[in-house]
Image (cartoon, rainbow, N blue to C red):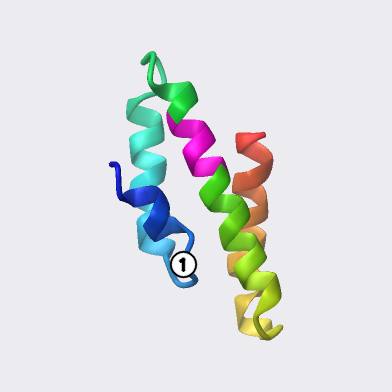
Amino acid sequence: MEQLPTALERAGSEESWAVADTVSRALENSEDVHSWRRRVLSACMKGLVAMYSSSRDESRQEVERSMLLRLEELL
C-alpha cells in the first residue's frame, strides 16, 4: 500500500489503479481514508501531468478520461 501511489504516477498503470480502487473501497470507513485519498489524489495529478506532457496519442484518450473521472471523484 505504501508503494502503490508511486506506481500510479507512471503511464500505463491501469492495473495499479484497479488495485488502488479496491484499497480505497476497503478503507472507506477507516480513519486512514483521508490520508490515503490525499496520496492517491497526488498520484492522479502527477499521472495526468505526465500524460498531458507526453505525445497526444489518440489511443490514450480513454485512459485520460478514466483519470479525469478519478480526479473528479477524489476531489
Q: Is residue 62 magenta?
A: no
**27 or 39, nearer to the observer:** 39
Q: Which residue is mark 1?
A: 10
Which residue is at a point 35% across and 40% down the rendered structure image? Answer: 22
Is 21 positioned to the left or the right of 72 in the image?
A: left
Tag 1: amino acid: Arg
Percent of width and height locating residue 31 = 39, 13
Say above or below: 4 vs 55. Answer: above
Could you say which is closer to the camera, residue 67 or residue 44?
44
Magenta highlight range: 36-41
Q: Residue at x 43, y 32 (%)?
A: 36
49, above or below 28, in the image = below
Dot 1 crowding, Cα within 10 Å, few <14, some 14–19, many 20+: some
Q: Main secondary structure of the magenta part?
A: helix
Task: Tell me where residue 8 sits by quadrant.
Answer: bottom left
Percent across and percent down for residue 51 are: 63, 71
Does residue 70 appear to the left or right of 26 in the view shown?
right
Which residue is found at the position 67% from the left and 34% from the top? 75
Q: x%, y% of residue 47? A: 56, 61
